[in-house]
Amino acid sequence: MKDTIIKTSMLTKRFGDFVAADSITLEVGKGEIFGFLGANGAGKTTAMRMLCGLSIPTSGEATIAGYDIYTERELIKKKIGYMSQKFSLYEDLTVSENIDFFGGIYGLSRKDLAEKKEALVQNLGLQAHLKKLVGSIPLGWKQKLSFSVAVIHDPRIVFLDEPTGGVDPLTRRQFWDLIYTASSNGITIFVTTHYMDEAEYCNRVSIMVDGKVVALDSPSALKTYFKASSMDDVFYQLARNARRSE
Amino acid sequence: MRTIIILLRKEFRQIFRNKSILAMVIVMPVIQLIVLPLAADYEVKNINLAVVDNDRSAYSERLVNSIVASGYFRMAAYESSYKEAFKSIETDKADLILEIPAHFESNLIREGKQKTGISINAINGVKANLGGAYLSAIIRDFNPSETVIESAVLNRYNPLLNYRVFMVPGILAILVTMIGGFLSALNIVKEKETGTIEQINVSPIKKHHFILGKLIPFWILGNIVFTIGLIVSWAVYGIVPEGSILLLYGFIAIYLLAVLGLGLLVSTFCDTQQQAMFIMFFFMMIFILMGGLFTPVDSMPEWARMVVRFNPVSYLISVMRMVILKGSEAGQLVNHLLATAGFAVVLNALAVVNYKKIS
């Protein structure tokens, strides 16, 4: 494997007796698009929150971009972008103001910020929406904007938690174009999704069932191993025995 | 520094876009300061009186006349027996019954003393208490044959005992507290509800920068509310602070930090605006009712006075009255200043410690 950027070993999170994420061990290489799959309630978001420094693990080890997730969380935060399941730009600020704000708190200089904003707007075709409140633009735009804001500071890794939930197939496709562009710029993508066609776009995927990672390989290798015609089928074989579901 | 400017710019944009916050900051102090002092008046008037005159003499008539002439009472019923009069209490027509016994006049002339009976409907405690006291005072003064000892009372600092002059600074104190406390408490919780706080938490932003970014905008709003309040009290009630306005602003500056700190601390404990609202209400009710605005702190029991010492509002109400009515100087406010500064430091430190970027 190329340079490793995410490395976890036996990473576990318990809430009382409930083991939300159980002994997760995986490695993600630089520039890779890594699909983090699992049924609802399997523990994907919990695991991702630990990797982002939003939640402290109960046990296990992990390093993100070379920093330890127990002691160097604030350093990790400079190197990562995060897009949560819940849409989380400020709806009462305009598109432009959101870009200024999030770029600003990551310490981008005025000049860098102006360049980034210009490129972002060109890229997404947002010129007409720049002065509109984010709350008033369509969901598809919001998701694309959210992603662009999450990578505005050129992070090493971007974590995406179900970024394409509830958007139409065309927008999903455009969204994945953004992901590919970011990946080709060397940003590692760590993405959770429920859409198995999206899983096919990933370099490698892991599948979580009941808090544990039960499979980890490239989509084609997994299909061969499970003698399945599609990722849908692979997922079905693994997840149907799950005890936990929402 | 740049981070704080970025945070402030964002907060102010959101505040100016939120019409209800602007209305709360500008309209609320104006309306409340105009309406509340008119209603929140300690004087009780229009007490309904039922009289049972068993004597029907010239003296008893004079007594009744002087009661009515006092202006506090309204004759609701004039009955021939206590039983009849009691009916008017039961039907809520009367608040008090004055029973003048038979031979009232002759006893008074012969022995120089006579007892009368007063029955009070004590459901409305304030009205009953004051009504009974007024009535007793009138009856005591009535006795013409005794030498009456008159004492000359001089009301310093508020010579006409104008309740508005007394109430307005107190109500302004509560307004500043309410607006500052609620706005700051609800603000962080709103970010939790909409999920935007996740985006902040995953960024390298420092905790104390974030808290300062929340504190400063509401501190400025609090000062605006206070200024509007001072203007209204001058324009409507002609109240001009006897003491230094700078001293007032100096105290408010520290006081707002304390109240905002409480709001921020509450918001770090709560996940929804509803929870934050109820917790703030809990504190506000205690702060207001035990702040010395309605009930003098000195007449509270010992344990309650201990509680009042931890009530920032009581310090502000007291300082407002001291500076505005009495013209007190900084030297006389040292204890108030120290206590309030203490609250500010402790509450904000707790808010920073308890605001966690992780869960």
Image: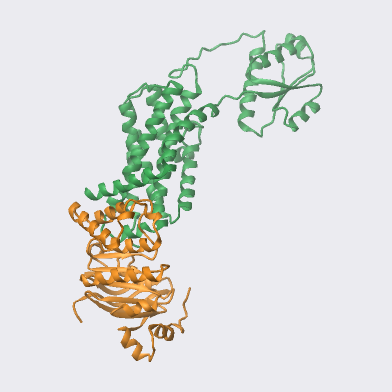
Chain colours: A orange, B green
> Percent position (x, y) of residue A130?
31, 53
- Tell me the quarter of the picture where residue A186 sits: bottom left
- Direction from residue B155 to residue B114 in the image, left or right: right
Residue A232 seen by the camera: yes
Residue A160 in the image: x percent, y percent?
33, 68
A19 vs B253: above or below: below
Q: Is residue A92 above or below residue A223?
A: above
Q: Is residue A111 left or right of residue B170?
A: left
Tell me if I can see residue A217 in this picture: no
Q: At which x and y percent is residue A39?
A: 43, 77
Res A48 quadrant in image: bottom left
B77, above or below A182, in the image: above
Nearest the viewer among A147 and B316 is: A147
Q: Nearer the viewer, residue B128 or A109?
A: A109
Give the side of residue B205 with respect to residue A39, left or right.
left
Q: Relative to residue B105, is residue B271 drawn left or right? A: left
* Residue at the (32%, 37%) spot, across then down: B254
Q: How many marks?
A: 0
- Identify the residue at horizontal 60%, vertical 10% (top origin): B148
Identify the image quadrant of residue A74: bottom left
Q: Is residue A146 above or below residue A7?
A: above
Percent of width and height locating residue A4: 21, 77
Residue at 66% across / 24% down in the picture?
Answer: B47
In front here: B108 or B133?
B133
Quarter of the picture holding the N terminus of chain A: bottom left
